[in-house]
Image (cartoon, grey):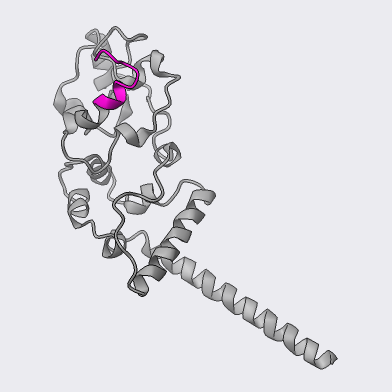
Amino acid sequence: MARSWRRRLVFGTATAAGVCLVAAVTLAVVAAKERDNRFCVSCHLHEEKFDRFTSTAATDLAGVHQVKDRGVGCIACHGGADAGMRARVWALAAIDTAKYLVGLHEEPARMKLSLRDAECRQCHRPILKAPVAGGPAASSALTGGAPLPARAIDPSDESTFAATSQGEGAAAASYHALRDHDGVTVRCVRCHTSHTTDSGAKDRFISKRIVQPICRECHKQM
């Protein structure tokens, strides 16, 4: 009886250790492969978005991040900024992989796990950087908040925002520079859409088609 109990204990321990080892190796492989953009695109069939993302001349906001730092990949935004979201991403990936292997996977029309502000704030903190002496934002302040020339605008550099206004009166100030907006809660990605192409660098790739209805939620008379 005691010998049988010992065998079961040894077998159970060995099985648990084997499962843990397989899980650890699997997670290590996934963690390595998910940093390869091609690995992501092999299942998520976004070839057009991928071509824009890796282009040498940015044509959308995601592309701006890649042009500025070629080490930035899909997983930088879509991987989760904390352990909780990371676990949810991996759980969803595991479910999707199982569906794919049995032929039941369909490419979703929208993201199942929406990007939160936390994902953006991994890099964009603070939102408004202090103007660099002699830089574009400083020059704008010296000219009384005059609009910056398009060539001076880096869509991923918040220090180019004109931040001279304290109220809604000055059209030259950006949304983030207006203190009246401090209490407004709008998710970053509602305005800063990464893969839309109906805007350009001079507008920081912010689509009027998308942003104007959001503004009208408060500014009814726009």
Residue 133 rendering spot, x and y as whole percentages = 31, 19
Quick one: quadrant of the N terminus?
Answer: bottom right
Q: Residue at x 35, y 49 (%)?
A: 111
Q: In the displayed structure, would residue 22 be above or below residue 133?
A: below
**Where does residue 148 sit, x and y in percent of width and height?**
19, 19
Up/down of 68 relative to 89, above or below: above
Q: Is residue 90 above or below residue 205?
A: below
Q: 83 or 43: which is nearer to us?
A: 43
At 32% from the left and 20% from the top, the residue drawn is: 175
Residue 182 lies in quadrant: top left
Q: Is residue 160 left or right of residue 124?
A: left
Quarter of the C terminus within the rendering: top left
The answer to which of 191 and 155 lies nearer the viewer is: 191
Q: Can you name the residue that lies furthest to the right here?
A: 2
Inspect this view and state whether residue 131 appears.
no
From this viewpoint, is residue 62 visible?
yes
Q: Position of residue 49 (x, y in %)?
A: 21, 51
Q: Main secondary structure of the magenta part?
A: loop
Per the image, is 11 magenta? no
- Please indicate whether residue 122 sits to the left or right of residue 1 in the image: left
Q: Residue at x 59, y 72 (%)?
A: 20
In magenta, the rendered stretch is 212-222
